[in-house]
Amino acid sequence: MTNEEMTQHPAPPTTEQSPASDENTTLHGSVATEAPFTQKIPDTPQPAQVPPPAEPTQPAKTGSARTSPWLIAFLAVLLVVGSSAATYLITTIDNDEVPAAQTAEPGSDEQQAPAELVSGEEPVADAAAVILPSVVQIQAGQGVGSGVIYDSNGLILTAAHVVEGADTVTVRFADGEQVEGTVLGGTAGADVAVIQVEGTDLPAAELALDDAPQVGQMAIAVGSPWGLQGTVTSGIISAVDQAIPQGASARAVLQTDAAINPGNSGGPLVDRQGRVIGINVSIFSLSGANDGVGFAVPIDIAHGIAESLVAGEEIQTAYLGVSLGVVESGQGGALIDDVTPGTGADEAGLEVGDLVISIDGAPVQDGGDLAAQVQTHQPGDTVDLVVVRDGNEVTVPVTMSERPADLG
């Protein structure tokens, strides 16, 4: 078992197709039996086609067994809504339930002009004004997702599951113009894809590649939830480097409570300056809609993958070369119970029984956390692992190997 295969955190049984492990395929959402679930943000239906409201359903029941943090992280909803399954729920209030509005006579002292919007006093409005021209709606088959122009010569970042199985898609710009886009490629491992459209001098968004997101900072999501193009929601960054499972491995994502729903997938998560800090890809949900826990691929990872896709390069994944066991003592960290010969871990001298407690200065909470942090690196990168060995802390420099193809 490799460092990406966490035996102490088995994936729950599903009633849907399990996520694919192939780096060149797109993940499918899954629903755990008798447990909360997560899935890709589904493509949204076309706004003009509004089906009648569906009968209300009860939230999925949860099992009585204790749920591990790794299992909870696995149950995430991927954000693409299919038009055949989407339903709009519209609530109306009878007139007799709404108190009459109190109005002032024209010209009276009670009547006041609305306050003018002052730059800097409404950071969400300021950020929205910056990013909205760069956000597009993507029609792929029967579903709708989102994307963001990141290069003025027609390159668009989105989520891989939004364009799964498509060679071309319809791209709708903020001003309503629609053009055909060509899918240059994508990787299910990170859920990132790139679309090319014809054009020059397009409104490209600024990417916050050099500023690490901070827990608690403002976060603004923009996209087409339920097909409603140009929708803006806001919240904060709830966590950084949050580990969620990806096939037999894991990946590190940003977590936010900014409302994202089916159709937001592939759209940008931005900071208060309107700079892109992540690409929205999934949510944790008991209902299939926003429950205040959303996930985004960090923009430095998404941009690096995009550059490789545009250049036609193979997407390579870093590989440590260890199997991990359960930490019986309850101490935080990732316990090594096997080292694969010929890998970076083997050549660096990692040993069975080593407890990895940090990687390049970042604390390691458990095996899933270590696997996710490994995935943020490239083959050939050298990292410093701090391990507890025989009661002493030892720093071990490790050069990452390339993940074997037979591991998916």
Image (tube, rainbow, N blue to C red):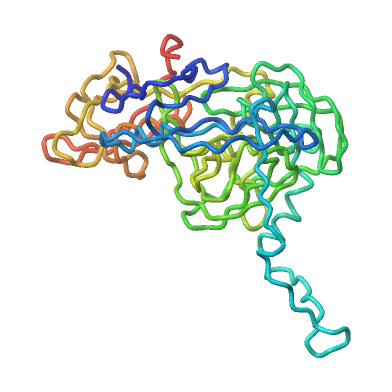
Pick whichever, 29 or 270, lies toward us: 29
Q: Where residue 122 sits: x, y (%)?
A: 68, 66
* 363 lies left or right of 134: left
- When asked about the image quadrant of residue 382, the answer is top left
Q: Position of residue 60 (x, y in %)?
A: 43, 34
Exactly how many numbered labels are in the figure?
0
Q: Residue furthest left?
A: 390
Identify the image quadrant of the N terminus.
top left
Report whether 86 appears left or right of 31: right
Q: Quadrant of residue 321?
A: top left
Residue at the bottom extreme?
Answer: 109
The x, y position of residue 55, in whole percent, is: 58, 35
**x and y, in percent, of residue 96 in the image:** 69, 64
In the depicted view, which residue is nearer to us: 327 or 364? 327
Q: Please name the residue shown 83% across and 40% down the image.
A: 202
Quadrant containing the C terminus is top left
Residue at the spot 66% in from the left edge and 39% down from the top edge: 267
Q: Residue at x 53, y 22 (%)?
A: 27
Front in this rendered view, residue 149 or 82 = 82
Residue closer to the observer: 314 or 34: 34
Is residue 71 shown left or right of residue 117? Answer: left
Q: Residue furthest top?
A: 406
User: Please, is residue 379 above or below residue 52 in the view?
Assistant: above
Q: Could you say which quadrant of the image residue 337 lies in? A: top left
Looking at the image, residue 146 lies above or below residue 131: above
